[in-house]
C-alpha cells in the first residue's frame, strides 16, 4: 500500500485550517487505539436517539480528515497535494452488527480494495477510504469524480448499497471515530 497523506483537523467542523497531516496507517492507529477519541466517540454515540443533538455533538467533538489530500484550508481550490483516496460513506444500515458485516465484506472486495474501513460515528454506517489512480492526462477533479462515480455505481450494482452522495467534493470532511476493529490494508 502506498502511504497516502491527508489533512487532519481538530474539532469543531467550523475549524477550516488543518492541524497536521496524517497517512492512512497513522489514521488507523488513531482510530483503533486513541483513548481520547474513544471517549469523544462514546459521548457522541450516547446521543444517537436524538438526531439533532447527535449531529451537533459529532460536529463539535469529533476530529476529521480530508481523505482526498492535503489542504492549506478546507476548500476545494486550496488543495496542495492530492492523496489519490476518496471516502465512501454508507449510512442508515439496519444495525451496528450489519455495519460491522459491511465494514468487513467491503474491505475484502477486490474491486474497491479500500485502504481503510471503519464503522461510522452512528454505529449504523461504514466509511471506506478507497484509492484511485491519478492521471497525468486528466485533472485531479476529473479523476476523483470518475473514480467516485464508478465506485458508487459498483456498490449499488454489486451489493444494492447506496453511498452518501454528499461526499462529492475534494474538500469533503470525513469524521473520525473510535473503532477498535477498523481494517487497514497492509499490501
Image: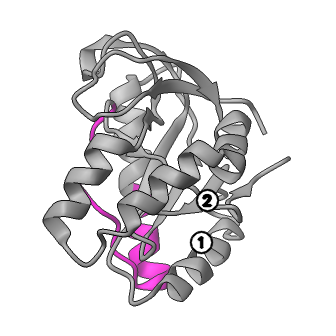
Mark 2: which secondary structure?
strand
Residue 5 horizontal/vertical position (percent): 60, 25
Disc 2 crowd rating (10 Å Cα; few below 14, some 14-19, many 20+) is: many
The residues tagged by marks 1 and 2 sit, at their Cα atoms, a distance apart of 6 Å
Could you tell which of marks 1 and 2 lies nearer the N-terminus? 1
The stretch of residues the image draws in magenta is: 150-170
Q: Is residue 156 visible?
A: yes
Q: Can residue 177 be seen by looking at this rendering? A: no
The numbered mark at residue 147 is none
User: Is residue 153 depicted above or below 49 in this figure?
Assistant: above
Q: Which residue is mark 2?
A: 117
Element on which disc 1 rests: helix
Question: What's the residue at 18%, 70% (across, down)?
Answer: 51
85 vs 143, nearest the viewer: 85
The residue that mark 1 highlights is 103
Q: Are marks 1 and 2 in contact (CB under 8 Å)?
A: yes
Label 1 environment density (alpha carbons within 10 Å; few <14, some 14–19, many ≥20): many
Residue at (29, 62) in percent of width and height: 164
Quadrant in which residue 89 is drawn: bottom left
Q: Is residue 179 above or below residue 60?
A: below
* Residue at far right of view: 187
Membership of 169 in magenta stretch: yes
180 relative position to 125: left or right: right
Write the residue at 34% across / 39% down.
Answer: 173
Amino acid at each position: 500500500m502506498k502511504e497516502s497523506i491527508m489533512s487532519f483537523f481538530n474539532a469543531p467542523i467550523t475549524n477550516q485550517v488543518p492541524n497536521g497531516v496524517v497517512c492512512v496507517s497513522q489514521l488507523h492507529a488513531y482510530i483503533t487505539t486513541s483513548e481520547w477519541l474513544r471517549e469523544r466517540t462514546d459521548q457522541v454515540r450516547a446521543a444517537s436517539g436524538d438526531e439533532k443533538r447527535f449531529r451537533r455533538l459529532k460536529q463539535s467533538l469529533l476530529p476529521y480528515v480530508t481523505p482526498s489530500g492535503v489542504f492549506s484550508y478546507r476548500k476545494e481550490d486550496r488543495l496542495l497535494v492530492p492523496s489519490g483516496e476518496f471516502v465512501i460513506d454508507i449510512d442508515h444500515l439496519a444495525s451496528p452488527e450489519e455495519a460491522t458485516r459491511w465494514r468487513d465484506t467491503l474491505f475484502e472486495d477486490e474491486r474497491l480494495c479500500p485502504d481503510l474501513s471503519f464503522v461510522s460515528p452512528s454505529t449504523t454506517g461504514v466509511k471506506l477510504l478507497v484509492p484511485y489512480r491519478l492521471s497525468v492526462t486528466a485533472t485531479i477533479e476529473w479523476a476523483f469524480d470518475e473514480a467516485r462515480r464508478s465506485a458508487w455505481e459498483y456498490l449499488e450494482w454489486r451489493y444494492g448499497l447506496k453511498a452518501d452522495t454528499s461526499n462529492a467534493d475534494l474538500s469533503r470532511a470525513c469524521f473520525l471515530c473510535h473503532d477498535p476493529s477498523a481494517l487497514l490494508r497492509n499490501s
